[in-house]
Image: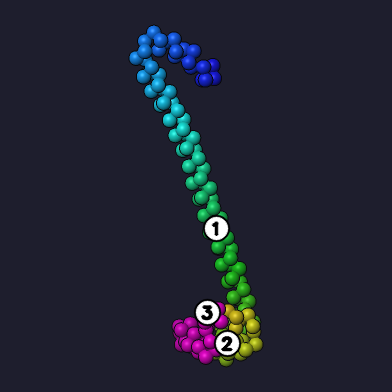
Amino acid sequence: VAGDSWGQIAIPVIEKQPSLALIFFGVLLTISLGLTNLILAVIVERAAQAREEDIQERVKQKEQEQETQKQKLFKLCQQIDMDGGGTLTLKELLAAYEEIPDFKDILNLMDIEKEELKAVLKVLDTDGSGDVSY
C-alpha cells in the first residue's frame, strides 16, 4: 500500500483492457517526473539560499576588514602626526617615511617613493592649506 504494489491492480486491469496500459504508463511517468521535479526544485532552492547566505557573510567580513583597516590607518596617522594637531604636513610625512617602517611599507606597496610624497600631499590637500586632516 506504500505505492510499490500498483501492479496488483494495474496488471489485471491491463489484461482485461490492454489499451489502458498507455494510461497507466502515462500516470506512472507523470508521477515519477513530477516527484523528480519537486526534489530537484528543493535542491536548487536550498543551493540558492546557501549562496545568498555566503554572499551576505562575505560582505559582512569585508565590512569588518575595512573597519579594521580604517582603525589601523587612523592609528598610523596619529603616530605620524608629531605635533598632535590632527593634520599631517609634508615634513611629518617625510619624517615618517624614514622613521616608521609600517608607513614606508604601505607606501612601497602602493609604489610611492619618498620623492613622490609632495605630489601625494598636493593631491590630498584639497583646500590648499599645506596639510591634510585625518
Rate crowding at label 3 as few (under 14), some (14 to 19) or many (20 or more) other CA atoms within 10 Å: few
Whole-percent x, y for residue 46 in the image: 51, 43
Residue ID for mark 1: 58
Residue 130 seen in the current view: no
Res 93 label: 2
| Disc on the earlier residue, 2 or 1 | 1
Say whether marks 3 and 2 touch (CB < 8 Å).
no
Lateral position of residue 59 relative to residue 14, left or right:
right
In this view, the mark in front (2 or 1): 1
Rate crowding at label 2 as few (under 14), some (14 to 19) or many (20 or more) other CA atoms within 10 Å: many
Which of these two is toward me, 2 or 15? 15
Residue drawn 58% across the image and 71% down it? 70
Residue ID for mark 3: 110
Badge 2 marks a residue whose secondary structure is: helix
| Disc on the earlier residue, 3 or 1 | 1
Badge 1 marks a residue whose secondary structure is: helix
Residue drawn 55% across the image and 58% down it? 58
**Distance in Å between CA atoms under marks 3 and 1:** 25 Å
Which of these two is toward me, 84 or 38? 38
Residue drawn 61% across the image and 86% down it? 96
Outermost residue to the top: 16
Q: Which residues are magenta?
A: 107-134
**Distance in Å between CA atoms under marks 2 and 1:** 35 Å
Mark 2: which amino acid?
Answer: Leu
Describe the colour scheme in one phrase.
rainbow
Q: Is residue 131 magenta?
A: yes
**Distance in Å between CA atoms under marks 3 and 2:** 15 Å
In this rendering, the answer to whether 129 lies above or below 28 is: below
Lateral position of residue 128 relative to residue 75, left or right:
left
